[in-house]
Amino acid sequence: MPESVAYIQRPAWAKWLQRAIYILAYGLFGVAGWAAVGTLGSPAHEAGYLAMAASALAIVGVVTRLYQLELIALWPLITSMAIWVVWLVIPPQSAVLTGWLVAAYIPFLAARLLNLNLIARKAREEVAP
């Protein structure tokens, strides 16, 4: 897969699986934002609103395959996460946000696994007679 391609193009099952994984991941970041708004104080509370909006924008980018929207959304998501990390190291804090943040990372690891499996599959096909 060329580096200039933002999303998997084929096989079709991988293309759709990647899309579903990204939607799930960004959706979980939105839920983490919602958890922050509902349980944490300032500035983590405000970062929750920022994360929810950015997650929605990223999902629109994935669904429409307009990587530019996803790219724009990543900056506020990263900023929100940085604020939450600082907030979470100041005890005592709620474990609710921590759980959702960990859950949000799982689909990104699955996406990487998908990409690497496709690369390995292509390598096996090139070696096999």
Image (cartoon, helix red, strand yellow):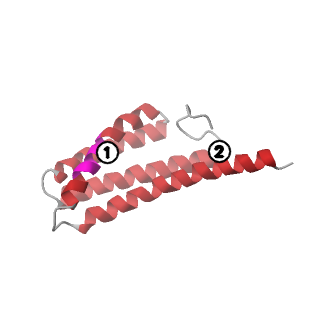
Alpha-carbon neighbours of circle 1 within 10 Å: few (<14), some, or many (≥20)? Answer: many
Residue at (34%, 45%) from the top-left corner? 55
Q: CA distance from mark 1 to mark 2?
A: 29 Å
Q: Quadrant of the N terminus?
A: top right
Residue 125, percent from left and from top:
77, 48
Q: Amino acid at mark 1?
A: Leu
**Which residue is at the front of the view, 127 or 101?**
127
The disc placed on residue 128 is none
**Which residue is at the front of the view, 37 or 47?**
47
In the picture as drawn, the residue positioned furthest to the right comes out as 129
Indicate which disc, 1 or 2, sits on the residue closer to the N terminus. 2
The range drawn in magenta is 76-83
Residue at (51%, 50%) from the top-left corner? 20
Q: Identify the residue position indicated by label 2 in the image.
A: 12
Mark nearer the viewer, 1 or 2: 1
Our reading of the magenta stretch's main secondary structure is helix
Q: Amino acid at mark 2?
A: Ala
Specify whether 29 is left or right of 22. left
Residue 43, percent from left and from top:
15, 50
> Marks 1 and 2: CB-CB under 8 Å?
no
Q: Identify the residue position indicated by label 1 in the image.
A: 77
Secondary structure of the residue carrying numbered label 2: helix
Q: Determine if the magenta segment contains residue 127.
A: no
